[in-house]
Image (cartoon, rainbow, N blue to C red):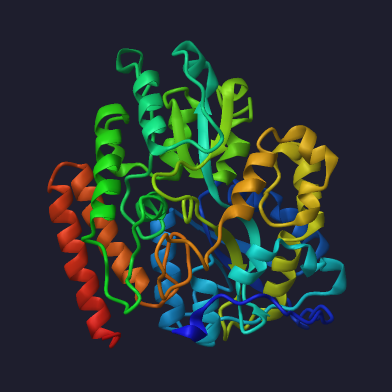
Amino acid sequence: MKSLRNTALGLALGATTAMTAVAGELTIATVNNGHMIEMQKLTPEFEKSHPGITVNWVTLDEGTLRSRVTTDISTKGGQFDIMTIGMYEAPIWGERGWLEALEFGADYDVEDILPAMRGGLSHDGKLYAAPFYGESSMIMYRKDLLDAAGMTMPDNPTWGHVADAAAAMTDKDAGVYGICLRGKPGWGDNMAFLSTMANSFGAKWFNEDWTPDLDSAAWNHAVTMYVDLLTQYGPPGSEGNSFNEILALINEGKCGMWIDATIAASFVSDPKQSKVADVIAFAQSPVAVTNRGANWLWAWSLAIPAGTKQADDAKSFIEWATSKEYIELVAATNGWGSVPTGTRTSTYENQNFLDAAVFAEAELKAILSADPSNSTQDPTPYVGVQFAAIPEFQAIGTVVGQQMTAALAGDISVEEALANSQAAADREMRKAGYY
């Protein structure tokens, strides 16, 4: 498994690959998040500067996207010329030869990409996906509600403090819920959040011998608190909520607090989108017994499946969409507070961005604090904060996510959910020959 560890990038800069003689159509699979929707709106700018290339979009919710692109690339289906993937897939798929290595011209300035993002999207010194936006996780909360309750939010709160704050901000008669968290099942959905919460309680996915550890007391403590928080202070139907559902709730003023992707900060603080933009504040993710692994690390990134007949045109699009110039285009179109963040050092050195983005300092602090190689209180054999960077994790995380949603919905107990998860993970690891 050592070969699957994320490695630091040692990418040699080469000349930009020339366009093919006959430019064609690009089909891009992406997630239905706000920054991707904006990229689609700005695509005519790319087509204008690259005559002959046309771009077709397949826009999917997070869970469906993961399933579709995984099936397509593993079966060599060839449906997509560019895929939106993340830090879990890029090094594993790159090692398997499923992705084209990316090399860009000197003007692209690959060294400007934050080291955590470059490393997480590379294998054996080669970049296999370029980050469109990067993120960690943090608390976004309504300061007005906390002020009214006579409470404050420290920058590094405990989970106990978060529970007290959620109780204080809840006013169900007014349609305000103290805390909103992901409940929709998925290894990158509810489990992205729950893994970080469990990490802070001292939990881990696997012991040093690769034995699953999901039936531990630490997992039980974390999941029990998660279920209790959402049952008592969360909105109805939390088991169906993912990023976009909660974003809509908080922008309507219905959530006192949301712990999720830092990228959401630009939306919740935008008065054009959020009714409570002027009272939103930020803090680092909560901790229980440790701050290791308390906030995730991720980058929604663009990659090229090996074997596409449009590889050169695909590289041209990725170079455009993940460049400094693209960030400036978004700034010119929508303002510096709306640019895709979490990817480039230069963004956080730009005074225009710092002046416009009230969340910039908290976001960068969260990203820089996430350490995929040291994400648990006790030693583990895997790399990753909210996932374990092994091929088997996707199947395991999917099943565990379903069990956690069932517990949240009240269909089974937390103990049953964790026992079922442990059994499923054990079967998968035995089948894969880990022990």
In the displayed image of the protein, which residue is found farthest to the right? Answer: 107
Q: Is residue 398 left or right of residue 54?
A: left
| Residue 305 location, quadrant | bottom right
Residue 408 image point, x, y percent: 23, 43
Q: Residue at the spot x=74%, y=71% of the render?
A: 316
Q: Which image quarter holds the C terminus?
A: bottom left
Residue 211 image point, x, y percent: 27, 75
Q: Which image quarter holds the N terminus?
A: bottom left
Q: Residue at the spot x=82%, y=55% of the render?
A: 325
Q: Residue at the spot x=83%, y=38% of the render?
A: 352
Q: Is residue 230 left or right of residue 354?
A: left
Tell me, yes or no, if residue 51 can be seen here: no
Q: Nearer the viewer, residue 117 or 129?
A: 117
Q: Nearer the viewer, residue 147 or 394?
A: 147
The total number of labels drawn is 0
Q: Residue at the spot x=77%, y=47% of the render?
A: 348
Residue 61 image point, x, y percent: 43, 53
Tell me, yes or no, if residue 281 can be seen here: yes
Is residue 398 depicted above or below 360 in this figure?
below
Q: Is residue 143 left or right of residue 18?
A: left
Is residue 80 depicted above or below 220 in this figure?
below
Is residue 15 depicted above or below 386 in this figure?
below
Residue 110 image point, x, y percent: 77, 69
